[in-house]
Image (cartoon, helix red, strand yellow):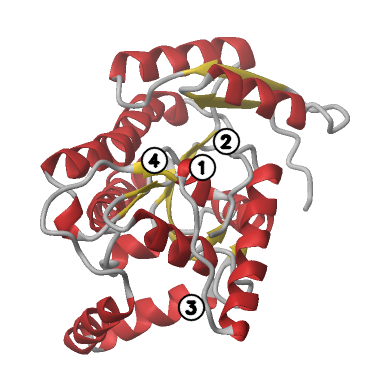
Amino acid sequence: MVEQECAVTVAARDEQELSRAEDYLRLRPGARVRTAVCDVRDQDAVRELFRATAEAQGGVDVVIANAGIIQVAPLGAIGVAEFREAMDSIFIGALHASLEALPHLRRSRAGGRLALIGSVGGLIAAPHLLPYSCAKAAVAALAEGLHAEVAPEGVSVTAVHPGLMRTGSHVAAEFGGDQAEEFAWFSALAGMPLVSMDARRAAERIVTAARRRKTRLVLTPAARAAEFTHGVAPALTTRLTALSVRALPSSPQRPTPLRKGAETTSPRPTHPLKRKLHTWATALNDRASHAYNQHTRHHPSR
């Protein structure tokens, strides 16, 4: 990856997580990194984040908004609260970041660049990820609308829609319903190399897209194929998605408390080949959780 020689500010809610990220990034010779505790659901906090960043670093040229949560559960296991939580973190967070960044990006001598991280789940609704899909769909609309409105002002907006990423997100995701089964399919699928993408490679593609002022970036061949199929035959794609629900864990009759992946055990498939694939894919995802600063511990299988 070609170094862009940017001074970087990393913002998140968790001070310890930020401290670990700063230590990791400072291992790079010459890295200019600062961190800031910020909850993107709080617009005043986001405004202060950009003010302080512009003052400390002489302006703001590039903003990448990627805050969010993942709730993996069938519809019967969740309620309105989970949808509100997803919208607040994912969509409202992206909205606050965009609105507060734009005044600074308009003043950028290099020409401001804003990248909003959506998801293929926001282009095609994913079963057992419905709050996430709804919030990411709103981010997709926000990115497209902002691009049209601010392009005349010299600011570019890039909508990024990743497919499954090997980031270790399974340990921070929240699971409902049959939590062990939900954790098992999500962690294994998100770790499969032919289906998911390595986070570092994804980051390189995102940086390149923002630098080149691309309007839209869809990551992973599977995500691009799904987007194309949905565009050509949306009704057929919806029917096929409905069929895929049969392969997922059954839905409870009432909402259940969600539990983080780091607190969830994963059942081992009984078929030898399935067990081997599951173990391999989950191990890759666990390795990613250590590499990319996710809160984690050992996940025993039963």
Cβ–Cβ under 8 Å for marks 2 and 1: yes
> What kind of residue is marked 4?
Gly
Label 3: which residue? 222
Residue 24, position in %: x, y? Answer: 75, 31
Q: Position of residue 34 (x, y in %)?
A: 65, 19
Kindly state the secondary structure of the residue where label 4 is placed. loop
Q: CA distance from mark 4 to mark 1?
A: 17 Å
Dot placed on the residue nearer the N-terminal end, 4 or 2? 4
Distance between mark 1 and mark 3 Cα atoms: 27 Å
What is the spatial separation of the Cα atoms under label 3 and label 4, in whole angstroms? 22 Å
Asked if residue 265 can be seen in this view, the reply is: yes
Q: Nearer the viewer, mark 1 or mark 3?
A: 1
Bin the neighbour count of mark 1 within 10 Å (Cα to Cα): few under 14, some 14-19, many 20 and up. some
Dots 1 and 3: beta carbons under 8 Å?
A: no
The residue under the point 46% across, 22% down is 13
Crowding around mark 3 (Cα neighbors within 10 Å: few <14, some 14 to 19, many 20+) is: some
